[in-house]
Structures are given as C-alpha cells and as structure tokens.
C-alpha cells in the first residue's frame, strides 16, 4: 500500500464530506465486468476481508479504487475484420462502405469480449480534509483524473485543482539546477530531465549524474529547461518532481522504515492502520515544505 507516486489536488473552497459519505461509496462499489462489458470500475475496501469502503483516521481517509479492463488484442479484431471485409467484397464485387466497416468492427468486439482476459488495477488515495488536499498514488494524469471523476460521481461535486505553485514548475526546477542547489530543506539529487524550448522532441535525461557540474548549466544556457528533477529531503524521502508538480518514484528513508519495523502489529488491518498514519504524516510534511520552497522561489 505504500505510495510510489503523488498526484496532488487542492480544494478550491472549504469542503467537508457529507455525513453519509460511506453510504455514497457503497452505492458505487466495484463489480466485475459482465460478459459483454469492456470495463468496470468502483470502490473496494482498503482493508482486506472488510466490507468498509474506506479507512478513516481523524480527518484523513484512505480510499481504494479498483478497475477491471477486458484485454482484447487489436490484431485479433483486425484479423477478423479483414476476413469479413474480404468475404463482403467477393460477394458484392465492391469494397465494404466505411460506415458498415465501423458497425462490423463494433459487432466483432462485442462478440469477442466474453472470451477476453481481464486486467485488474487499483488506485490508492488519501483525502486529507484537514489540509484540504487529495493525494492520488499515480504518476499518470489520466489515471488521477479517472479517480477524481469517480469520486465526483459519488459526491456530486469535487471542487479541486491540481496542487502546485502559481509559477511554472519548470521555472523553479531550472533555477535550482542553475544555482546548483535546491531551496532548503531540499537538496539536488542525481537525476534530471532537460527539454529544449526551440527544438521539439529534444530531451536530455541524466541518471546518477552530478547536476552541479558546468556542462549541465551549459545546457540551460542553450535554451533548455528542467522538466523533471531528483530531490532529497534530508533523511525523509527521495523523489522526482516534474513540471506538473507531480511527485514520482518515492523512496522512503531509513528513519521511517526503521520506525515502521519497530511498531509491531497484531494483524494485517492493524499494520495497514500504522502504515497509513506514518505515510500520511510524511506526505503532509513534505507538501508543506515544498509549498514554502515554492513561495521562496517566487520571491527570490
């Protein structure tokens, strides 16, 4: 359950969950795909062998969204469609009209779906009502929006916007690399991605590289900007911050892992409860520290 990425949303106005929030989630629980359904999505319990659709700790709520997708190879559909088109052309002595091709393709997909394999995925998230934030464990903007859309369908409204500073993230990241140091308490890591303003598609990716050397600054002087930057937060976390203010490739420090190991749990549910508390506290402090660093960058 430990998050690997963070797509963060900030509420745009004071927001409180309705008293019957749990019942709202229960109305949108995950159900397996029907024979002819291409996909299914819904809430599942964060706690194994539990019927509760959420895990609550004070003003923090842990949610889990489950999705099933039927995997239907495009090559299988194309092969069947080509065979049907060839038969049509032999019978009618003319190509099949485009409109009929589309209808036939939809019919083929409908007939193949019951035999298709399923792919399952889960997306975790934390609703932090104290800080008015939503933290989604994904690096994909599409998947994060899918999560917010499902939550919005339960609540009726979800007034959120992507979290971050007023100025572009790439400007902040580029200045930190140009200066050879990130804003305290953060330190530059050894990974970065640089893109050109002028030449579309030109990307330089640095791995395990000293970002303070002159050659990196030369890239910036030649009209490139930083779109992804590795950062260290003392002994707490290592991560990548990208130009959408998304946090990726989270790596927890030894201090937190040792604290986790020192807390014995009598059950899987109790372990999840402990992990949730530790992880949320770390993320809340991280986002607060980043906001301060962004404000400093704005005024410097």
Image (cartoon, rainbow, N blue to C red):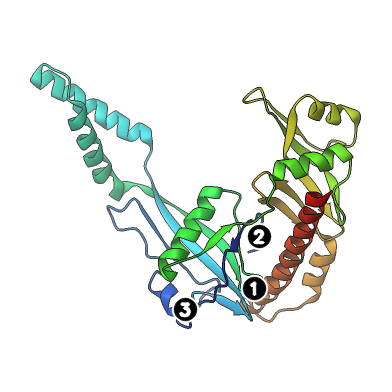
Q: In this view, does 296 lie to the left or right of 247?
A: right
Kindly report the distance in space between the C-alpha atoms of the residues bearing marks 1 and 2. Answer: 12 Å
Sequence-first disc among 2 and 3: 2
* Residue drawn at the location 33% of the way across and 34% of the way down: 76
Please provide percent x and percent y for residue 12: 57, 64
* Residue drawn at the location 55% of the way across and 49% of the way down: 141
Residue beneath label 1, please? 272
- Front position among marks 2 and 3: 3
Please provide percent x and percent y for residue 108: 24, 39
Q: Is residue 185 left or right of residue 112?
A: right
Kindly report the distance in space between the C-alpha atoms of the residues bearing marks 3 and 1. Answer: 19 Å
Please provide percent x and percent y for residue 18: 48, 79
Secondary structure, mark 3, is helix
Residue 199's label in the rendered image is none
Residue beneath label 2, please? 3
Kindly report the distance in space between the C-alpha atoms of the residues bearing marks 2 and 3. Answer: 23 Å
Q: In this view, does 119 lie above or below 21?
A: above
Which of the 4 image quarters holds residue 172?
top right
Residue 22's label in the rendered image is 3
Secondary structure, mark 1, is helix
Crowding around mark 2 (Cα neighbors within 10 Å: few <14, some 14 to 19, many 20+) is many
Residue that extends furthest to the front in the rendered view of this protein: 299
Crowding around mark 3 (Cα neighbors within 10 Å: few <14, some 14 to 19, many 20+) is some
Sequence-first disc among 3 and 1: 3
* Residue drawn at the location 28% of the way across and 55% of the way down: 35
Which of the 4 image quarters holds residue 48?
bottom right
């Amino acid at each position: 359950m430990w998050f690997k990425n963070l797509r963060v949303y900030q509420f745009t106005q004071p927001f409180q969950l309705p008293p019957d929030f749990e019942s709202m989630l229960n109305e949108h629980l995950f159900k397996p795909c029907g024979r002819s359904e291409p996909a299914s999505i819904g809430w599942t319990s964060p706690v194994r062998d539990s019927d509760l659709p959420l895990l609550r700790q004070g003003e923090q709520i842990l949610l889990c969204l489950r999705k099933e997708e039927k995997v239907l190879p495009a090559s299988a559909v194309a092969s069947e469609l080509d065979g049907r088109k060839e038969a049509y052309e032999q019978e009618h002595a003319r190509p099949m009209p485009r409109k009929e091709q589309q209808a036939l393709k939809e019919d083929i997909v409908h007939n193949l779906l019951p035999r298709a394999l399923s792919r399952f995925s889960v997306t975790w998230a934390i609703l932090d009502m104290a800080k008015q934030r939503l933290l989604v464990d994904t690096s994909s903007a599409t998947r994060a929006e899918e999560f917010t859309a499902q939550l919005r369908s339960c609540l009726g409204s979800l007034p959120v916007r992507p979290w971050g500073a007023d100025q572009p993230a790439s400007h902040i990241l580029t200045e930190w690399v140009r200066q050879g140091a990130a804003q305290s308490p953060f330190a530059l890591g050894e990974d970065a991605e640089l893109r050109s303003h002028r030449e579309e598609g030109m990307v330089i990716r640095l791995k395990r590289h000293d970002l303070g050397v002159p050659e990196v600054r030369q890239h910036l002087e030649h009209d490139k900007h930083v779109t992804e930057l590795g950062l260290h937060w003392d002994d707490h976390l290592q991560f990548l911050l990208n130009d959408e203010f998304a946090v990726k490739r989270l790596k927890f420090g030894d201090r937190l892992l040792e604290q986790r190991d020192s807390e014995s749990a009598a059950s899987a549910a109790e372990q999840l409860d402990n992990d949730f508390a530790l992880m949320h506290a770390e993320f809340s402090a991280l986002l607060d520290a980043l906001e301060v660093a962004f404000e400093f960058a704005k005024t410097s």
